[in-house]
Image: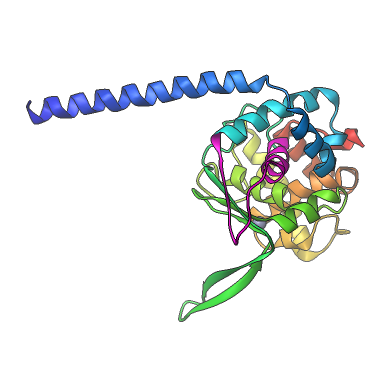
Amino acid sequence: MTIAKYVIATIGLVSTFLVGKYVFRRKMRKRLLFMPFPEQWEEIVRRNVPLYNRLPVPLKEQLPGLVHIFLEEKKFEGCGGLKITDEIKVTIAAQACILLLNRKTACFRKLRTILVYPHTYVARTKSSNGIVTIDGHSVRLGESWQNGPVVLAWDSVTGGTFNVTDAGNVVLHEFAHQLDQEDGAADGAPILEHRSSYITWARVLSREYEALQRRSKRAVMDEYGATNPAEFFAVATETFFEKPGQMKKNHPELYDELKNYYKLDPAEWM
Ligand SMILES: [Zn+2]
């Protein structure tokens, strides 16, 4: 076989494999999308995800299918001796999938693995002032890697989800980062449905981000959102779902941008 024929044959095989994989995944998703929660999962979600109890019925009916797809496609790994249970998987997946309701998405397409630590964990950090690189340690509740895993501390997950009005929810936060990173940049601008939406998004979010940096408005959002635009979007997402009434009242334009993006109106669920 000549090299050209060999290359053509290899391309043919790879294409067939990829098309087959795509068709199989589509069929699988279609089947899973209409599956209800098993009774045990329903109990876990009712107990551990108060936000679920607020959802209007049509959204409550949408969520199980997304959770099934999430659990089929993502892998969970326990770290620091943590054994992964259905409770851990379903509690995390249900909250992550609330961000996908009402939207055509590929279910966090870049994400393959969720690492879960039992407690808040310590990560090694590197920073540089341009002259020296400093190694350090930082205490983390969770993190989201571009093209890599989401890392969560189970005690932060339970601490954040059980209080539904404190605007602190590490799962919503880290998975908002995943959405932001889907276009290859962690810049606080996820993929929007229409090109024309980016102009208003940039105008509103930059203004609100700068206001949070100046602390010029009564702070509804946690000031961690003033760290950079990516953190602003993640913290704004937490606030949108956990303090929707306050956000709508004090930051109506920001609320509207998030409402248009998530295609959800949590202020109406109160
Ligand atoms: Zn963050």
Residue 12 placement, left or right of 18: left
Pinpoint residue 98: horizontal percent, then vertical percent: 73, 36
Pinpoint residue 262: horizontal percent, then vertical percent: 72, 35
The residue most toward the bottom is 132
Can residue 168 be seen from the camera position used here?
no
Give the residues drawn in magenta, as a range. 73-98
Q: Residue at x 61, y 34 (%)?
A: 70
Magenta run includes residue 5: no
Q: Quadrant of residue 223?
A: bottom right
Q: Residue at x 88, y 37 (%)?
A: 267
Quarter of the image that includes the C terminus: top right
Pinpoint residue 29: horizontal percent, then vertical percent: 57, 23
Quarter for ligand 1?
bottom right
Q: Quadrant of residue 125?
A: bottom right
Depth check: give the residue in front, 12 or 128: 12
Depth check: give the residue in front, 148 or 250: 148
Pinpoint residue 135: horizontal percent, then vertical percent: 51, 77
- With respect to residue 60, does 211 lie above or below? below
Q: Quadrant of residue 215?
A: bottom right
Quarter of the image that includes the N terminus: top left
Can residue 37 be seen from the camera position used here?
yes
- With respect to residue 137, does 31 lie above or below? above
Q: Number of labelled discs?
A: 0
Magenta run includes residue 76: yes
